[in-house]
Image (cartoon, grey):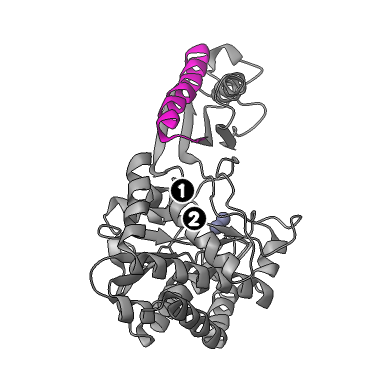
Amino acid sequence: MDIGKIKNSIGRDIDSGYKKLHQLSRNLHENPETAMEEYKAASWLTEYLAQNGFTVEKGICDLPTAFRAQYGKGKPSVAFLAEYDALPKLGHACGHNLIAAGSVAAGVACRKVVDELGGSVTVFGTPGEELAGGKAIMAERNAFTGIDVAMITHPGGGHHVLMSALACQNLYIEYFGRAAHAAAEPETGINALAAMILAFNAIDALRQHIKETSRIHGIITDGGEAANIVPAHTAATFMARAVENKYLDELKEKVIGCFAGAAAATGAELKYRWDSVRYASMNNNVTLGQLFRANMEGLGRSIPLGDGTRSSGSTDVGNVSQLLPTIHPTVSIAPDSVYIHTRGFAEVAASEDALRSMLDAAKAMAMTAADILSSPEMLKKVQAEFRKNN
Ligand SMILES: [Zn+2]
Ligand SMILES: [Zn+2]
Protein backbone atom coordinates (compact mmCIF):
# COMPACT_ATOMS: atom_id res chain seq x y z
CA MET A 1 0.00 0.00 0.00
CA ASP A 2 1.40 3.35 -1.06
CA ILE A 3 -0.21 6.19 0.92
CA GLY A 4 1.12 8.73 -1.60
CA LYS A 5 -0.71 6.99 -4.43
CA ILE A 6 -3.88 6.76 -2.37
CA LYS A 7 -3.74 10.50 -1.63
CA ASN A 8 -3.22 11.24 -5.33
CA SER A 9 -6.31 9.21 -6.14
CA ILE A 10 -8.31 11.31 -3.64
CA GLY A 11 -7.25 14.50 -5.42
CA ARG A 12 -8.19 13.05 -8.81
CA ASP A 13 -11.56 11.79 -7.55
CA ILE A 14 -12.62 15.22 -6.28
CA ASP A 15 -11.31 17.00 -9.39
CA SER A 16 -13.21 14.65 -11.67
CA GLY A 17 -16.42 15.14 -9.63
CA TYR A 18 -16.16 18.93 -9.82
CA LYS A 19 -19.06 19.51 -12.21
CA LYS A 20 -21.49 17.48 -10.14
CA LEU A 21 -20.25 18.97 -6.84
CA HIS A 22 -20.59 22.47 -8.25
CA GLN A 23 -24.14 21.71 -9.28
CA LEU A 24 -24.97 20.36 -5.80
CA SER A 25 -23.52 23.42 -4.10
CA ARG A 26 -25.39 25.76 -6.48
CA ASN A 27 -28.69 23.87 -6.08
CA LEU A 28 -28.46 24.26 -2.31
CA HIS A 29 -27.51 27.92 -2.65
CA GLU A 30 -30.40 28.69 -4.98
CA ASN A 31 -32.91 26.80 -2.82
CA PRO A 32 -32.08 27.93 0.70
CA GLU A 33 -33.94 25.94 3.37
CA THR A 34 -33.82 26.95 7.04
CA ALA A 35 -33.11 24.76 10.07
CA MET A 36 -34.89 21.38 10.07
CA GLU A 37 -36.70 22.20 6.79
CA GLU A 38 -33.87 21.07 4.49
CA TYR A 39 -35.91 18.49 2.56
CA LYS A 40 -34.54 19.28 -0.91
CA ALA A 41 -30.96 19.48 0.32
CA ALA A 42 -31.17 16.16 2.16
CA SER A 43 -32.70 14.47 -0.87
CA TRP A 44 -30.10 15.82 -3.36
CA LEU A 45 -27.20 14.92 -1.10
CA THR A 46 -28.42 11.40 -0.30
CA GLU A 47 -29.17 10.80 -3.99
CA TYR A 48 -25.57 11.71 -4.86
CA LEU A 49 -24.16 9.47 -2.12
CA ALA A 50 -26.41 6.54 -3.09
CA GLN A 51 -25.36 6.91 -6.74
CA ASN A 52 -21.79 6.58 -5.53
CA GLY A 53 -22.32 3.30 -3.72
CA PHE A 54 -23.15 4.55 -0.21
CA THR A 55 -25.83 2.84 1.89
CA VAL A 56 -28.20 5.64 2.84
CA GLU A 57 -30.53 5.87 5.81
CA LYS A 58 -32.77 8.94 5.89
CA GLY A 59 -34.59 10.54 8.80
CA ILE A 60 -32.28 9.13 11.49
CA CYS A 61 -32.69 10.23 15.14
CA ASP A 62 -36.32 11.15 14.40
CA LEU A 63 -35.11 14.15 12.43
CA PRO A 64 -36.72 14.02 8.96
CA THR A 65 -33.84 15.89 7.25
CA ALA A 66 -30.96 14.07 8.98
CA PHE A 67 -29.23 11.13 7.29
CA ARG A 68 -26.43 8.62 7.53
CA ALA A 69 -24.61 7.40 4.41
CA GLN A 70 -22.03 4.70 4.86
CA TYR A 71 -19.42 3.04 2.65
CA GLY A 72 -17.53 -0.02 3.83
CA LYS A 73 -17.94 -1.82 7.12
CA GLY A 74 -16.36 -1.83 10.52
CA LYS A 75 -13.37 -0.07 12.04
CA PRO A 76 -11.67 2.26 11.94
CA SER A 77 -14.66 4.42 11.07
CA VAL A 78 -14.21 7.96 9.89
CA ALA A 79 -17.09 10.44 9.58
CA PHE A 80 -17.61 13.64 7.66
CA LEU A 81 -20.35 15.95 8.90
CA ALA A 82 -22.45 17.81 6.35
CA GLU A 83 -24.44 20.94 7.20
CA TYR A 84 -26.96 22.37 4.74
CA ASP A 85 -29.32 24.74 6.54
CA ALA A 86 -29.62 28.37 5.45
CA LEU A 87 -30.41 31.50 7.45
CA PRO A 88 -33.86 33.11 7.48
CA LYS A 89 -34.00 35.94 4.90
CA LEU A 90 -30.22 35.80 4.20
CA GLY A 91 -30.01 32.45 2.39
CA HIS A 92 -26.64 30.67 2.53
CA ALA A 93 -24.91 33.48 4.43
CA CYS A 94 -23.05 30.89 6.53
CA GLY A 95 -21.92 28.97 3.42
CA HIS A 96 -23.38 25.64 4.51
CA ASN A 97 -23.98 24.78 0.84
CA LEU A 98 -20.17 24.61 0.58
CA ILE A 99 -19.86 22.51 3.74
CA ALA A 100 -22.32 19.99 2.27
CA ALA A 101 -20.46 19.78 -1.04
CA GLY A 102 -17.12 19.42 0.77
CA SER A 103 -18.20 16.67 3.18
CA VAL A 104 -19.96 14.70 0.45
CA ALA A 105 -16.90 15.07 -1.81
CA ALA A 106 -14.58 13.87 0.98
CA GLY A 107 -16.81 10.87 1.65
CA VAL A 108 -17.00 9.79 -1.98
CA ALA A 109 -13.24 10.30 -2.44
CA CYS A 110 -12.63 7.90 0.48
CA ARG A 111 -14.22 4.92 -1.30
CA LYS A 112 -10.90 3.94 -2.81
CA VAL A 113 -9.19 4.34 0.58
CA VAL A 114 -11.74 2.01 2.19
CA ASP A 115 -11.47 -0.47 -0.71
CA GLU A 116 -7.69 -0.67 -0.23
CA LEU A 117 -7.32 -0.31 3.53
CA GLY A 118 -10.61 -1.54 5.02
CA GLY A 119 -12.63 0.30 7.64
CA SER A 120 -15.57 2.53 6.80
CA VAL A 121 -16.47 6.07 5.95
CA THR A 122 -19.76 7.71 6.91
CA VAL A 123 -21.25 11.01 5.80
CA PHE A 124 -23.71 12.33 8.37
CA GLY A 125 -26.36 14.76 7.22
CA THR A 126 -26.69 17.06 10.21
CA PRO A 127 -29.61 19.49 9.84
CA GLY A 128 -30.39 22.69 11.71
CA GLU A 129 -26.95 23.88 12.79
CA GLU A 130 -28.24 27.44 13.10
CA LEU A 131 -30.12 27.69 16.42
CA ALA A 132 -31.75 24.23 16.26
CA GLY A 133 -28.59 22.33 17.34
CA GLY A 134 -29.16 19.31 15.09
CA LYS A 135 -25.87 17.66 16.05
CA ALA A 136 -26.58 18.18 19.76
CA ILE A 137 -29.84 16.26 19.30
CA MET A 138 -28.14 13.59 17.16
CA ALA A 139 -25.35 13.21 19.73
CA GLU A 140 -27.90 12.75 22.49
CA ARG A 141 -29.67 10.11 20.39
CA ASN A 142 -26.40 8.20 19.91
CA ALA A 143 -26.00 8.84 16.17
CA PHE A 144 -22.21 8.93 16.50
CA THR A 145 -21.71 5.75 18.54
CA GLY A 146 -18.95 3.61 17.01
CA ILE A 147 -17.38 6.47 15.02
CA ASP A 148 -13.64 6.93 15.63
CA VAL A 149 -13.04 10.43 14.27
CA ALA A 150 -15.21 13.19 12.80
CA MET A 151 -14.32 16.08 10.49
CA ILE A 152 -16.06 19.09 8.98
CA THR A 153 -14.67 22.24 7.35
CA HIS A 154 -16.51 25.57 7.59
CA PRO A 155 -15.96 28.42 5.12
CA GLY A 156 -14.96 31.91 6.27
CA GLY A 157 -14.93 33.47 9.71
CA GLY A 158 -11.15 33.04 9.88
CA HIS A 159 -8.46 30.80 8.46
CA HIS A 160 -7.17 28.23 10.94
CA VAL A 161 -7.41 24.55 11.80
CA LEU A 162 -8.30 24.66 15.50
CA MET A 163 -11.47 26.53 16.28
CA SER A 164 -12.93 27.97 19.41
CA ALA A 165 -16.62 27.49 20.11
CA LEU A 166 -18.34 28.45 23.32
CA ALA A 167 -20.74 26.29 25.26
CA CYS A 168 -24.09 28.02 24.87
CA GLN A 169 -27.68 27.77 26.03
CA ASN A 170 -30.72 29.90 25.30
CA LEU A 171 -32.90 31.23 28.10
CA TYR A 172 -36.54 32.30 27.77
CA ILE A 173 -37.73 34.80 30.38
CA GLU A 174 -41.20 36.06 31.27
CA TYR A 175 -42.33 38.46 33.99
CA PHE A 176 -45.96 38.60 35.10
CA GLY A 177 -47.08 41.81 36.84
CA ARG A 178 -50.44 43.55 37.17
CA ALA A 179 -51.90 46.04 34.71
CA ALA A 180 -53.06 49.44 35.96
CA HIS A 181 -53.76 52.93 34.60
CA ALA A 182 -50.25 54.40 34.62
CA ALA A 183 -51.47 57.85 35.74
CA ALA A 184 -54.80 57.28 37.57
CA GLU A 185 -53.92 54.25 39.76
CA PRO A 186 -50.24 53.42 39.33
CA GLU A 187 -50.11 52.25 42.95
CA THR A 188 -52.30 49.23 42.11
CA GLY A 189 -49.98 48.01 39.33
CA ILE A 190 -47.00 45.67 39.32
CA ASN A 191 -44.61 46.69 36.56
CA ALA A 192 -43.30 43.71 34.59
CA LEU A 193 -41.18 46.03 32.42
CA ALA A 194 -39.47 47.54 35.45
CA ALA A 195 -38.51 44.00 36.47
CA MET A 196 -37.08 43.32 33.00
CA ILE A 197 -35.07 46.56 32.95
CA LEU A 198 -33.71 45.89 36.42
CA ALA A 199 -32.69 42.42 35.31
CA PHE A 200 -30.85 43.86 32.26
CA ASN A 201 -28.98 46.22 34.60
CA ALA A 202 -28.18 43.38 36.99
CA ILE A 203 -26.76 41.36 34.06
CA ASP A 204 -24.65 44.39 33.08
CA ALA A 205 -23.31 44.53 36.66
CA LEU A 206 -22.66 40.78 36.66
CA ARG A 207 -20.74 40.96 33.39
CA GLN A 208 -17.95 42.87 35.10
CA HIS A 209 -17.21 39.93 37.40
CA ILE A 210 -17.34 36.87 35.19
CA LYS A 211 -14.58 35.23 33.15
CA GLU A 212 -13.86 37.60 30.29
CA THR A 213 -14.31 34.91 27.65
CA SER A 214 -17.94 34.37 28.72
CA ARG A 215 -20.86 36.07 27.05
CA ILE A 216 -24.38 36.99 28.18
CA HIS A 217 -26.67 38.80 25.75
CA GLY A 218 -30.36 39.17 25.15
CA ILE A 219 -33.29 41.09 23.70
CA ILE A 220 -36.73 42.08 24.97
CA THR A 221 -39.38 40.36 22.86
CA ASP A 222 -42.38 41.82 24.71
CA GLY A 223 -42.01 45.18 26.45
CA GLY A 224 -45.61 46.03 27.25
CA GLU A 225 -48.61 47.31 25.30
CA ALA A 226 -49.07 51.03 25.76
CA ALA A 227 -47.30 53.85 27.55
CA ASN A 228 -50.35 54.57 29.70
CA ILE A 229 -50.75 50.97 30.94
CA VAL A 230 -48.48 49.51 33.60
CA PRO A 231 -47.05 46.47 31.73
CA ALA A 232 -48.55 43.25 33.08
CA HIS A 233 -46.34 41.01 30.96
CA THR A 234 -42.84 41.19 29.48
CA ALA A 235 -40.66 38.60 27.80
CA ALA A 236 -37.03 38.29 26.73
CA THR A 237 -34.67 35.80 25.12
CA PHE A 238 -31.14 35.54 26.44
CA MET A 239 -28.06 33.50 25.60
CA ALA A 240 -25.34 32.50 28.05
CA ARG A 241 -21.98 31.28 26.75
CA ALA A 242 -18.70 30.12 28.28
CA VAL A 243 -15.48 28.41 27.20
CA GLU A 244 -15.86 25.56 29.69
CA ASN A 245 -19.05 23.53 29.91
CA LYS A 246 -18.70 23.50 33.70
CA TYR A 247 -18.37 27.27 33.96
CA LEU A 248 -21.54 27.65 31.90
CA ASP A 249 -23.39 25.84 34.69
CA GLU A 250 -22.06 28.38 37.22
CA LEU A 251 -22.88 31.25 34.91
CA LYS A 252 -26.44 30.03 34.41
CA GLU A 253 -27.07 30.20 38.16
CA LYS A 254 -25.69 33.73 38.38
CA VAL A 255 -27.86 34.82 35.45
CA ILE A 256 -31.02 33.41 37.02
CA GLY A 257 -30.02 35.24 40.24
CA CYS A 258 -30.23 38.54 38.33
CA PHE A 259 -33.73 37.77 37.07
CA ALA A 260 -34.92 36.50 40.46
CA GLY A 261 -33.55 39.60 42.20
CA ALA A 262 -35.48 41.88 39.84
CA ALA A 263 -38.64 39.88 40.53
CA ALA A 264 -38.19 40.33 44.28
CA ALA A 265 -37.55 44.05 43.89
CA THR A 266 -40.68 44.72 41.83
CA GLY A 267 -43.10 42.05 43.00
CA ALA A 268 -43.43 40.67 39.46
CA GLU A 269 -43.54 36.91 39.06
CA LEU A 270 -40.63 35.34 37.15
CA LYS A 271 -41.01 32.36 34.84
CA TYR A 272 -38.04 31.03 32.91
CA ARG A 273 -37.05 28.11 30.76
CA TRP A 274 -33.63 27.01 29.54
CA ASP A 275 -33.69 25.64 25.99
CA SER A 276 -33.62 21.84 25.82
CA VAL A 277 -30.73 22.04 23.34
CA ARG A 278 -27.36 23.03 24.72
CA TYR A 279 -24.32 23.66 22.54
CA ALA A 280 -21.14 22.19 24.04
CA SER A 281 -17.77 23.88 23.74
CA MET A 282 -15.30 22.74 21.08
CA ASN A 283 -12.74 20.13 22.08
CA ASN A 284 -10.16 20.30 19.27
CA ASN A 285 -8.10 17.22 18.53
CA VAL A 286 -4.71 18.76 17.79
CA THR A 287 -3.17 15.50 16.47
CA LEU A 288 -5.94 15.23 13.91
CA GLY A 289 -5.63 18.96 13.20
CA GLN A 290 -1.92 18.62 12.48
CA LEU A 291 -2.62 15.85 9.96
CA PHE A 292 -5.21 18.04 8.23
CA ARG A 293 -2.82 20.95 8.16
CA ALA A 294 0.00 18.87 6.64
CA ASN A 295 -2.39 17.60 3.95
CA MET A 296 -3.51 21.17 3.15
CA GLU A 297 0.16 22.23 2.86
CA GLY A 298 0.71 19.28 0.53
CA LEU A 299 -1.99 20.75 -1.69
CA GLY A 300 -0.21 24.11 -1.67
CA ARG A 301 -2.70 25.72 0.72
CA SER A 302 -1.11 27.20 3.77
CA ILE A 303 -3.28 27.29 6.87
CA PRO A 304 -2.14 28.10 10.40
CA LEU A 305 -2.96 25.62 13.14
CA GLY A 306 -4.13 28.43 15.45
CA ASP A 307 -4.47 27.90 19.16
CA GLY A 308 -8.24 27.50 19.28
CA THR A 309 -8.60 30.07 22.03
CA ARG A 310 -9.96 33.16 20.28
CA SER A 311 -13.45 33.66 21.57
CA SER A 312 -16.08 33.20 18.90
CA GLY A 313 -19.62 31.94 18.58
CA SER A 314 -20.95 28.47 19.19
CA THR A 315 -21.51 25.41 17.03
CA ASP A 316 -23.20 22.07 17.55
CA VAL A 317 -19.97 20.44 16.29
CA GLY A 318 -18.87 21.10 19.88
CA ASN A 319 -21.30 18.39 21.06
CA VAL A 320 -19.71 15.87 18.68
CA SER A 321 -16.22 16.92 19.79
CA GLN A 322 -17.07 16.02 23.39
CA LEU A 323 -17.84 12.44 22.32
CA LEU A 324 -15.05 11.58 19.89
CA PRO A 325 -11.89 13.10 18.33
CA THR A 326 -13.10 15.90 16.07
CA ILE A 327 -11.75 18.79 13.99
CA HIS A 328 -13.63 21.76 12.58
CA PRO A 329 -11.14 23.81 10.50
CA THR A 330 -12.19 27.15 9.07
CA VAL A 331 -11.09 28.00 5.54
CA SER A 332 -11.15 31.59 4.35
CA ILE A 333 -13.17 32.11 1.16
CA ALA A 334 -13.71 35.87 1.36
CA PRO A 335 -11.82 39.07 2.22
CA ASP A 336 -11.59 39.72 5.98
CA SER A 337 -14.08 42.58 5.64
CA VAL A 338 -16.85 40.21 4.48
CA TYR A 339 -18.32 38.61 7.59
CA ILE A 340 -20.37 35.44 7.81
CA HIS A 341 -24.12 35.87 8.31
CA THR A 342 -24.21 38.81 5.88
CA ARG A 343 -25.58 39.18 2.35
CA GLY A 344 -22.03 39.75 1.10
CA PHE A 345 -20.95 36.36 2.43
CA ALA A 346 -23.98 34.67 0.87
CA GLU A 347 -22.83 36.05 -2.51
CA VAL A 348 -19.29 34.76 -2.02
CA ALA A 349 -20.66 31.33 -1.03
CA ALA A 350 -22.01 30.96 -4.59
CA SER A 351 -18.65 31.58 -6.27
CA GLU A 352 -16.49 28.94 -7.93
CA ASP A 353 -13.37 30.22 -6.12
CA ALA A 354 -15.07 29.54 -2.79
CA LEU A 355 -16.04 26.04 -3.89
CA ARG A 356 -12.49 25.30 -5.08
CA SER A 357 -11.09 26.35 -1.68
CA MET A 358 -13.62 24.14 0.10
CA LEU A 359 -12.92 21.21 -2.21
CA ASP A 360 -9.20 21.48 -1.44
CA ALA A 361 -10.18 21.30 2.23
CA ALA A 362 -12.34 18.27 1.34
CA LYS A 363 -9.28 16.63 -0.23
CA ALA A 364 -7.29 17.35 2.94
CA MET A 365 -10.08 15.83 5.07
CA ALA A 366 -10.17 12.69 2.92
CA MET A 367 -6.36 12.46 3.02
CA THR A 368 -6.51 12.79 6.80
CA ALA A 369 -8.99 9.90 6.78
CA ALA A 370 -6.43 7.93 4.73
CA ASP A 371 -3.76 8.73 7.36
CA ILE A 372 -6.05 7.30 10.04
CA LEU A 373 -7.19 4.23 8.09
CA SER A 374 -3.63 3.37 7.09
CA SER A 375 -2.04 3.72 10.52
CA PRO A 376 -3.42 2.11 13.70
CA GLU A 377 -0.63 3.92 15.61
CA MET A 378 -1.88 7.28 14.38
CA LEU A 379 -5.44 6.47 15.44
CA LYS A 380 -4.13 5.43 18.86
CA LYS A 381 -2.30 8.76 19.16
CA VAL A 382 -5.48 10.67 18.26
CA GLN A 383 -7.50 8.66 20.78
CA ALA A 384 -4.87 9.08 23.52
CA GLU A 385 -5.07 12.85 23.13
CA PHE A 386 -8.86 12.71 23.29
CA ARG A 387 -8.79 10.66 26.51
CA LYS A 388 -6.27 13.04 28.05
CA ASN A 389 -8.55 16.03 27.38
CA ASN A 390 -11.72 14.43 28.70
ZN1 LIG B 1 -23.82 30.33 10.95
ZN1 LIG C 1 -22.16 27.91 9.89
x and y percentages locating residue 215 in the rendered image: 56, 33
Circle 1 sits on which residue?
284
Amino acid type of the residue that numbered disc 2 sits on in the rendered structure: Gly
Q: What is the magenta range?
A: 241-267
Dot 1 or dot 2: first in sequence order is 1
Tell me which residue sits at (27%, 54%) in the image. Answer: 141
Say what secondary structure mark 1 lies in: loop
| Quarter occupied by residue 377 | bottom left
Circle 2 sits on which residue?
289
Contact between marks 1 and 2 (CB within 8 A): the answer is yes
x and y percentages locating residue 384 in the rendered image: 33, 47
Tell me which residue sits at (47%, 50%) in the image. Answer: 286
Q: Is residue 324 visible?
A: no
Horizontal relation, residue 370 to residue 294: left or right:
left
| Quarter occupied by residue 197 | top right
Q: Quadrant of ligand 1?
A: bottom right
Say what secondary structure mark 2 lies in: helix
Amino acid type of the residue that numbered disc 1 sits on in the rendered structure: Asn
Tally of numbered discs: 2
Q: Is residue 333 magenta?
A: no
Pick the residue in front: 252 or 177. 252
Q: Is residue 259 magenta?
A: yes
Q: From the image, which quarter does the N terminus lie in?
A: bottom left
Spot the residue most to the left.
Answer: 74
Q: Is residue 205 above or below residue 213?
A: above
Q: From the image, which quarter does the C terminus lie in?
A: top left
Pick the residue in front: 295 or 63. 295
